[in-house]
Amino acid sequence: VVQGTVGELPADIEHHACTDLSIFTARQNRYTTLQAEDAFRTMGALPERQIRQLLWKRPWKIFWKSYMKKGGWREGFHGLLFAEFYAGVDLLKWAKYWECCRRDATLR
């Protein structure tokens, strides 16, 4: 809901959410915890075999999509690091989901 005038900016907006790797990792650590907890709430505890598949396949898929399909390779070393970091973020999310499942199993 907008109150007031809606206009158009005459220039592009550059958005730099993270100025260094420590900010990026802190932010992603927080996000992956929230994502893992949300996945656990919505999906429950998946079989361990399926979790292992998610831990293995999903990060590679994220890397491939970022580096190859979206052309991250054109960005050189920066594109490679970006693809690796986001694959690592996905790995961390599923590892935390696995941790939630194991914690739940021990509470029963």
Image (spheres, grey):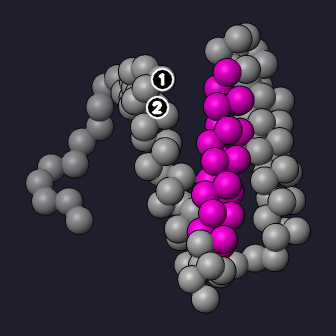
* Left or right: residue 8 compared with residue 73: left
Residue 70 appears in the figure: no
User: For mark 2, what is the residue?
Assistant: 24
Classed neighbour count for the residue bearing mark 2: other residues with Cα under 10 Å, few (<14), some (14–19), many (≥20): few
Majority SS type along the magenta span: helix
Residue shown at the point (13%, 59%) measured from the top left: 3
Residue in front for this viewpoint, 102 or 71? 102
* Left or right: residue 49 compared with residue 9: right
Residue 61 percent coordinates (x, y): 82, 45
Count of numbered circles in the view: 2
Classed neighbour count for the residue bearing mark 1: other residues with Cα under 10 Å, few (<14), some (14–19), many (≥20): few
User: Secondary structure beneath disc 1?
Assistant: helix
User: Secondary structure beneath disc 2?
Assistant: helix
User: Residue 98 has which mark?
Assistant: none
Residue shown at the point (53%, 68%) measured from the top left: 37
Residue shown at the point (47%, 60%) measured from the top left: 34
Are the two marked residues, 1 and 2, in contact with CB atoms closer than 8 angstroms? yes
Residue shown at the point (43%, 26%) measured from the top left: 22
Span highlighted in magenta in the image: 81-102
Please, what is the three-letter code of the amino acid marked with disc 2? Phe
User: For mark 1, what is the residue?
Assistant: 21
| Above or below, comparing residue 17 to residue 29 in the picture | above
Residue 81 percent coordinates (x, y): 67, 21
